Image: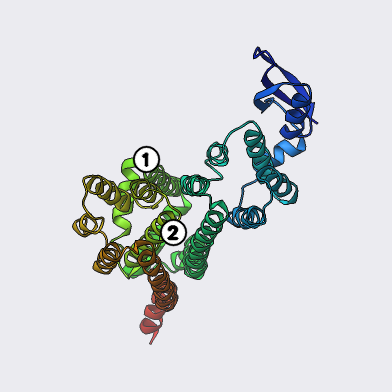
């Protein structure tokens, strides 16, 4: 049982507040309504340490759970089930403790007279602005079930694209980590053994060997702590700087110019997300100005977001969307030309969908091509790194053998 703090009004409209113990907000709301009160607000009392509360606060809601929730919700609404009844069923069906709590709070707000979109808007970490805006448009147009299916499809497409890129980059990252560990291990443990052996010989070491020995001695001395601390300090500083608005903007610009085709892939990802999001919003009936604004906010790249801010201003002045997109120099010609055709034919959402499909396929092909190139390059890099160290270690032996001959 949990303790809830509530605010109500009686039949005369006089406000009152108090506390009740119950299993959920819904139980508190039901009990108060049975007593003749009008529920104003219900919140769980802070300081609770129940296992359910701890699990709910620590658990992260996966994108897949939101997709399943949206599709099930759409099916229930399409079947004619009442909104509150559908939310009650979804609350009991979901396996996520955190999502169960969120659905319960949404249902309580809806029971209190709030619209579904306003109730969802209170949970921005679970239902982002794109989700809320589409639900609001669906409520206004009477097509909530269709809108929920569209937003579920949008979330699935984004999640699939992210997983594809992440899985493709796992192997190159593992090779990079392995190379770093091999380098550190050789510097700290292998080279000192050879260094002691060469010191006993008393002969002058080759330059390459001396450099390796000096680096190893530095890392194993007190200076090694300073070096590692400096490396971690630089990494922490970069991460911290990247979280600032200026750092984020700078990093987003740099990402688009990373060589070996990586910047090109990032741009294609941004185009796919931009096209899919804007298409979904437009086809759901969201006003074009609001759709452009939301697309900029959810673009995931400040370069695209800044371009969308300019597009919004130009569209407000009566210009077609394709014109400011062309002037921004961020969007490839194919994107702007297809949007221009869509504006002329009145099928912007269809054209945007085709653009999104094209760039998602392009990202898939580009990532596969990049990983097929990166893998042998990184393997050759690891081999070259180990080879240089081995040659540096054995050079004195080769020199000694030549002297003996």
Which residue in the protein does label 1 denote?
244
The residue located at (29%, 54%) in the rendering is: 253
From the viewer's side, name the closer residue of 293 and 347.
Answer: 347
Q: Position of residue 15 (x, y in %)?
A: 65, 14
Of the numbered discs 2 and 1, the one sitting upstream in the chain is 2
From the viewer's side, name the closer residue of 375 and 165.
Answer: 165
- Which mark identifies residue 216? 2
The residue located at (24%, 47%) in the rendering is: 310
- Which mark identifies residue 200? none
Q: Position of residue 11 (x, y in %)?
A: 70, 16
Q: Position of residue 141 (x, y in %)?
A: 49, 49
Crowd tier of the residue under label 1, counting other residues whose Cα lies within 10 Å: few below 14, some 14–19, many 20 or above: few
Real-space Cα distance between discs 2 and 1? 37 Å
Q: Residue furthest left?
A: 327
From the viewer's side, name the closer residue of 96 and 192.
Answer: 96
- Classify residue 35 as left or right of residue 79: right
- 27 is higher (above) or lower (below) than 329: above
């Amino acid at each position: 049982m949990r303790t809830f703090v509530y605010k109500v009004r009686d039949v005369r409209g006089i406000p009152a507040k108090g506390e009740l113990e119950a299993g959920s907000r819904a139980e508190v709301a039901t009990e108060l309504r049975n007593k003749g009160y009008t529920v104003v607000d219900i919140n769980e009392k802070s300081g609770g340490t129940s296992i359910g509360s701890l699990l709910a606060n620590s658990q992260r809601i996966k994108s897949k759970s939101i997709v399943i929730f949206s599709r099930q919700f759409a099916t229930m609404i399409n079947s004619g089930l009442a909104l509150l009844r559908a939310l009650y069923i979804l609350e009991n069906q979901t396996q996520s403790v955190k999502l169960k709590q969120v659905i319960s709070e949404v249902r309580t707000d809806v029971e209190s007279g709030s619209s579904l979109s306003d109730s969802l808007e209170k949970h921005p970490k679970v239902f982002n602005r794109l989700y809320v805006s589409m639900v609001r448009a669906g409520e206004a147009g009477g097509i909530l079930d269709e809108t929920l299916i569209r937003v579920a499809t949008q979330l699935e497409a984004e999640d699939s694209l992210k997983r594809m890129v992440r899985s493709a980059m796992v192997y190159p990252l593992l090779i990079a980590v392995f190379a770093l560990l091999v380098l550190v291990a050789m510097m700290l443990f292998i080279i000192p053994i050879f260094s002691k052996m060469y010191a006993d010989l008393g002969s002058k070491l080759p330059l390459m060997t001396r450099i390796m020995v000096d680096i190893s001695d530095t890392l194993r001395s007190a200076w090694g702590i300073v070096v590692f601390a400096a490396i971690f300090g630089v990494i922490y500083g970069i991460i911290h700087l990247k979280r600032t608005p200026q750092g984020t903007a700078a990093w987003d610009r740099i990402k688009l110019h990373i060589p070996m085709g990586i910047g090109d892939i990032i741009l294609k990802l941004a185009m796919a997300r931009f096209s899919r999001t804007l298409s979904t919003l437009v086809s759901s009936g969201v006003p074009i100005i609001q759709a452009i604004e939301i697309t900029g906010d959810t673009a995931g790249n400040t370069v695209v977001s800044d371009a969308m801010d300019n597009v919004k201003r130009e569209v407000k002045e009566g210009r077609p969307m394709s014109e400011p997109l062309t002037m921004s120099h961020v969007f490839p010609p194919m994107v702007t030309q297809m949007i221009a055709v869509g504006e002329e034919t009145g099928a912007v959402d269809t054209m945007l969908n085709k653009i999104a499909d094209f760039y998602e396929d392009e990202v898939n092909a580009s990532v596969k091509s990049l990983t097929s190139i990166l893998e042998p390059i990184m393997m050759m890099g690891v081999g070259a790194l180990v080879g240089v160290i081995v040659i540096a270690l054995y050079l004195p032996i080769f020199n000694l053998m030549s002297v003996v001959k």
